[in-house]
Amino acid sequence: MIVMETSKGTMKIELFADKAPLTCENFLNYVREGFYDGTIFHRVIPNFMIQGGGMSETMSEKKTGDPIKNEADNGLRNLRCTLAMARTQAVDSATSQFFINLRDNAFLDHGSRDFGYAVFAQVVEGLEVMDEIAGVATGSFGFHQDVPKEPVFIVRVSVED
């Protein structure tokens, strides 16, 4: 179980290591090195998703490891409460950033419009925290849009036995 402490409360996250082994191991590597601690949810779009895992409070991107293979063809769907890897237009470009689906987003699933976004986990406790983050006021920050006006921090992410 993953424990994600945020400035809005704590979420517990279950990994789907059997369906997304490379993605889960990548995520766990970032967790173990404390990479996510002190980052922010830098993109919040109500009724769609909240994204974090790679930006500081000043919207500077943290240096990451190499991109991983996209496991979006694992049979998991982008349903409410699931976590998926963020990526660029390139299929195999995900590094540290992830998003939490605030609703069922079938158009992000494998094969619906492109290769898709790899689901690798699910919020199992703290859904009210996820929804509270989704409700924060947002605006622009430089060329970034949908940025919380007051930062929502990922204080600490840890593995709970």
Image (spheres, helix red, strand yellow):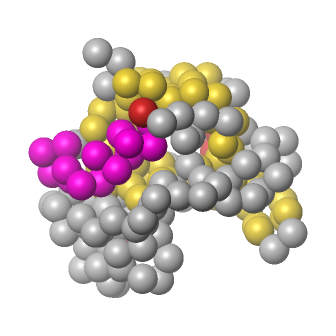
Looking at this view, name the residue that lies furthest to the left.
18
* Quadrant into which the C terminus falls: top left
Give x and y (percent) for residue 73.
Answer: 19, 69
Question: Which residue sits at x=66%, y=42%?
Answer: 39
Going by the image, does 106 lie left or right of 148? left
Give x and y (percent) for residue 9.
Answer: 61, 23
In the depicted view, which residue is nearer to us: 84 or 113? 84
| Image quarter of residue 16 | top left
Give x and y (percent) for residue 7.
Answer: 69, 27
* Quadrant into which the N terminus falls: top left
Task: Tell whether position 21 is magenta.
Answer: yes
Question: Which residue sits at x=48%, y=55%?
Answer: 96
- Our reading of the magenta stretch's main secondary structure is helix
Q: Is residue 142 above or below residue 152?
A: below
The magenta span reads 17-31
In the depicted view, which residue is nearer to us: 101 or 57? 57
Q: Is residue 14 above or below residue 24?
A: above
